[in-house]
Structures are given as C-alpha cells and as structure tokens.
Image (cartoon, rainbow, N blue to C red):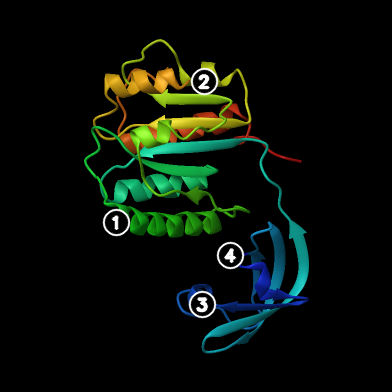
Amino acid sequence: MPHFFISSKDIQGKKALITGPLAHHLKGPLRMKSGERIHLIDEKMRGYHVVLDGIGRSEISGEVIGEDEGRVSDTAVVLAQAIVKGKRMDLIIQKATELGIMEIIPIISERSVVRPTPSGGIKDMRRWQIIAEEASQQSERWDIPSVHAPLSFSEYLDSPDPFDIAIILWEGERKKPMKEILKKGGRRIGLLVGPEGGFTDTEVDRARNKGFIPVTLGQGILRSETAAIAAISIAQYELGSLGSVQG
C-alpha cells in the first residue's frame, strides 16, 4: 500500500483531506483514482488506512477505514557529513534515510570543495529535507529524519550533543575497527564523515578532544558517500536495527 506523510490537521474524524504537493503527486504522476487505498502518517506517528473517494482539481478526499501507530526506535544514529559535490550529497541523504538515520547535519570542513553561503545553505537544506521525506515514503518509514542547515566543523564540535558513542571516520586510523567501538552499546550514536579529501590531522585531533573516537572501516580508502553508507549500515547492524526481524 503506498505510504505518504500528512498533517494531523488534515484528518477530521473518518475523513482525510489531501491538498498541496501531495495531492498533485497522487493525482498527477501516480494517477490515483477513487477506490484506491493509501497509508497516511501524521507528525504524531499515527497511521491512517484511507480509501480515496474524491479526486478534485486541487484536493483529494478519502475515508479512514483503519488506524495504526508507529513507534520510535530505541536507538538513534546521527550523521554529521562533510558536504560533497553535486548529486553525491543527494545520494547520501537518500541512502542514509533509507537506512534509518535520525538526523543529518551537513558540515563544512577544511577540505570541503562545496562551501554554500548562508542563504544557499538554507536552500540546500530545504531540498535535502524533501529528498529525505521522499526516501522515507519510499522505504515506508514512520518518521522523517531532520536535515539541519550546514555548520562549519568548529560550529558542529562546539554544539554539544549527548552521544553515548561518537565516532569519526579517519583513514589514518588502522587498528581500531568501527564495530569494536559499537560493541560498548548505546542509544545515541554520532557519526562524523569527511569530504572527498578526508579530514585533516588537526580536525581529527580537535574531534578526539571532544570525545570522538577515530575508527577505520577496513584497509581500503572509500569515497565519502561510500564511507557514509557503509558506516551507517555497520552501526544499524551492530545496534540491531538492520538485519533483524521484529515479532
């Protein structure tokens, strides 16, 4: 059943009223018709099974025939990703969302090639948030990860976050595998991933002084987007959020 997000104010009793971009998407590209069923989720993680019963020019109505409820994961993985060029950043946002990331914080580091202006960063953030929402719908998540406005490396380190485990990926670390650090367990995990040229030694030292543990993903040197996807996958697997079946 197709899966979409809606505001709780658009659910009135047993009726759902869909307007705006979602109505356009359902009516246009998806060519939804009366009688078809969809699953809507609001910001309170309340789900509604809806049968469409009216396709108007600018709105779509439906009857709520059932409700369900999602739950918040016991663990949260937060990705601080140095901004990379072009569609590669879009790919990171999309795949991180599919893999269950809870927050994405774009970072401007010393070797970042892309350095958005404040206004450009806000524009990028809004576009990335749309990518995250679309990926959440496609992967049938009950929530949408928050995509923050870009921060400098210093601003990020100076913004305290109560991580149980904080990890920085660094090609200079050869002996400390990421999965060994994750065996300590924790409910809030921070991942810090560098740009195309990696982090500088100075940045790694500063992150280490803030409690981040440098780790390796293996012998090879991975592209930034590959490293981010691999690190999230390892974290989710070790934390039990990936590769397990819930009863």
Please tell me whether mark 2 sits on a helix, a strand or a loop.
helix
Which of disc 4 and disc 1 is earlier in sequence?
4
**Left of 114 or right of it: where is 56?**
right
Please name the residue shown 41% across and 25% down the image: 168
- Residue toward you, 97 or 213: 213
Q: Earlier in the sequence, mark 2 or mark 4?
A: 4
- Residue 186: quadrant of the picture: top right
Q: In this view, does 228 lie above or below 68?
A: above
Whole-percent x, y for residue 8 in the image: 67, 68
Which residue corresponds to mark 3? 20
Q: How far apart are marks 4 and 3 (CA)?
A: 13 Å
**Callout 1: SS:** helix
Relative to 33, 111 lies left or right: left
User: Is the residue under label 4 in contact with that under label 2 (CB below 8 Å)?
Assistant: no
| Mark pair 1, 2: CA separation | 36 Å
Give the left or right position of residue 36, taking residue 178 as reference. right
Mark closer to the observer (1, 2): 1
Which residue corresponds to mark 1?
Answer: 120
Q: Which amino acid does label 2 sit on?
A: Lys
Amino acid type of the residue tagged 3 in the rendering: Gly
Q: Which numbered tag is attached to residue 4?
A: 4
Q: Is residue 45 above or below residue 13?
A: above
How far apart, in angstroms, are the residues tagged by discs 1 and 4?
A: 28 Å
Residue in the picture at 48% in, 34% down: 232
Task: Residue under label 2, please give it.
Answer: 179
Crowding near the residue tagged with mark 2, few <14, some 14–19, many ≥20 C-alpha atoms within 10 Å: some
The x, y position of residue 64, in whole percent, is 74, 74
Q: Residues within 10 Å of mark 3 (few under 14, many from 20)?
A: few
Residue type at mark 4: give it. Answer: Phe
